[in-house]
Image (cartoon, grey):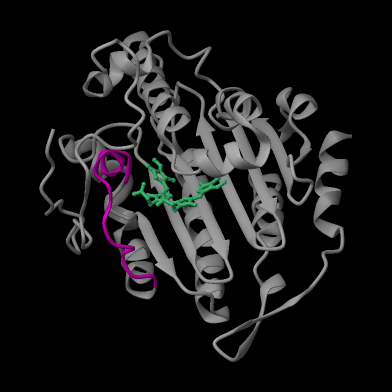
């Protein structure tokens, strides 16, 4: 029941408005992430048996403090899939999509990650199959999941150029096929992004379909811890925090981050942010509020065409 009512949000009509930029009309409503979500849910239903997550009851829809933004949350689970969830935000001046799929800990399959932030002047995008384990140090893991995906990655790397310097710490959560890009609004780029989203999503489903569940307890533990570390990082340092806090206030934003967007923090492990990332510890024992300790780096894409890491990683 929840599934059908939730999917109903895609058919709701959205107001259109025109915005003038540099003398040209730009149809802002052309940028809506609804069709990304619609595709993703239909594809998931085609691939697996999707059922609503228990989270759906608590996280459904929210209106921002100023009444101008609506946040829509959808969440599901399926065999092999711990959580498939989406958050989209639409206001008159911005559109946001945060879409992720987390495998069950029996699988070391990457995490599907699509984060898009759009205004009338810019689009900021991260689209990736975020590796669960270290792809810079562990060649076996990298080859297993990314070797065959390099051609797909390269196709889009050329169409969606590298977005420039970013929080250095983030890089360890990215794969050799990550699409990190910024572009000013254009229908062409937006179409390419949609096509990349569909291709990466289908590629992810191919990986999970082929994956055989781990039975070794220590391997499962290691997957669980890797996912917990990832969730812990993002719940604390994701670049969307400030905007979320502005929209719905600090308490609701924390709640949304810890219990919905990066759900699993309380279940998959008990280590804290500072256990995983001790370099963020202040003298008084609190977490440094800076997003980055190392600073920003990687002006250019730090992987070559074969997916070899060619950047410098500092610790
Ligand atoms: C910017 N979002 C960014 C940047 C990255 C990401 C790399 C550039 C700034 C930086 O280097 O930190 C995305 N970073 C990621 C992702 C991972 C990561 C996906 O480490 C995964 C491991 N973005 C959102 C949501 C909002 C949002 C939900 O996902 C708003 C509600 C906004 N992202 C947003 C904004 C910026 C941004 C406003 C530009 C501001 C800034 O650079 O801090």
Whole-percent x, y for residue 244 in the image: 59, 40
Q: Which residues are magenta?
A: 160-174
Task: From this view, report whether residue 74 is shown above or below residue 39.
Answer: above
Quadrant of the snapshot with the C terminus: top left
Whole-percent x, y for residue 300 in the image: 21, 63
At x 60% / y 90%, what residue is drawn?
A: 24
Whole-percent x, y for residue 129 in the image: 41, 46
At x 53% / y 20%, what residue is drawn?
A: 264
On whether residue 13 falls in the magenta region, the answer is no
Task: From this view, report whether residue 139 is shown above or below residue 180.
Answer: above
Nearer to me, 92 or 227: 92
At x 66% / y 30%, what residue is drawn?
A: 77
In the displayed structure image, the side of residue 79 where residue 8 appears, left or right:
right
Residue extending farthest bottom: 23
Task: From this view, report whether residue 225 is shown above or below residue 231.
Answer: above
In the displayed structure image, the side of residue 268 where residue 53 appears, left or right:
right
Q: Quadrant of residue 19?
A: bottom right
Quadrant of the snapshot with the N terminus: top right
In the displayed structure image, the side of residue 265 where residue 21 appears, left or right:
right
Q: Quadrant of residue 165?
A: bottom left
Whole-percent x, y for residue 89 in the image: 67, 50
On whether residue 165 falls in the magenta region, the answer is yes
């Amino acid at each position: 029941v929840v599934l059908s009512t939730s999917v109903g949000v895609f058919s709701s009509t959205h107001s259109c408005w025109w915005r003038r930029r540099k003398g040209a009309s730009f149809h802002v409503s052309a940028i809506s992430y609804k069709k990304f979500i619609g595709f993703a849910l239909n594809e998931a239903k085609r691939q697996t048996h999707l059922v609503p997550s228990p989270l759906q009851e608590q996280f459904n829809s929210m209106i921002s403090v100023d009444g101008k933004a609506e946040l829509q949350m959808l969440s599901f689970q399926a065999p092999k899939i711990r959580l498939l969830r989406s958050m989209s935000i639409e206001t008159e001046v911005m559109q946001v999509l945060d879409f992720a799929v987390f495998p069950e800990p029996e699988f070391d399959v990457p995490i599907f990650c699509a984060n898009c932030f759009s205004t009338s002047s810019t689009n900021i995008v991260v689209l990736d199959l975020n590796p669960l384990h270290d792809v810079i140090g562990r060649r076996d893991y990298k080859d297993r999941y990314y070797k065959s995906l390099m051609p797909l990655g390269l196709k889009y790397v050329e169409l969606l150029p590298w977005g420039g310097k970013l929080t250095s710490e983030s890089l360890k959560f990215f794969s050799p096929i990550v699409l990190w890009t910024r572009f000013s609004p254009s229908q062409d780029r937006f179409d390419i992004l949609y096509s990349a989203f569909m291709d990466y999503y289908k590629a992810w489903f191919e990986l999970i379909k082929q994956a055989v569940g781990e039975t070794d307890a220590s391997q499962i533990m290691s997957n669980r811890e890797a996912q917990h570390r990832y969730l812990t990082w993002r719940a604390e340092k994701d670049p969307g925090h400030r905007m979320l806090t502005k929209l719905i206030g600090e308490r609701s934003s924390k709640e949304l981050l810890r219990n919905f967007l990066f759900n699993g923090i309380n279940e998959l492990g008990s280590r804290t942010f500072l256990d995983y990332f001790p370099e963020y510890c202040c003298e008084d024992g609190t977490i440094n509020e800076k997003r980055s300790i190392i600073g920003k780096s990687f002006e250019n894409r730090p992987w070559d065409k074969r997916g070899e890491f060619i950047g410098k990683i500092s610790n």
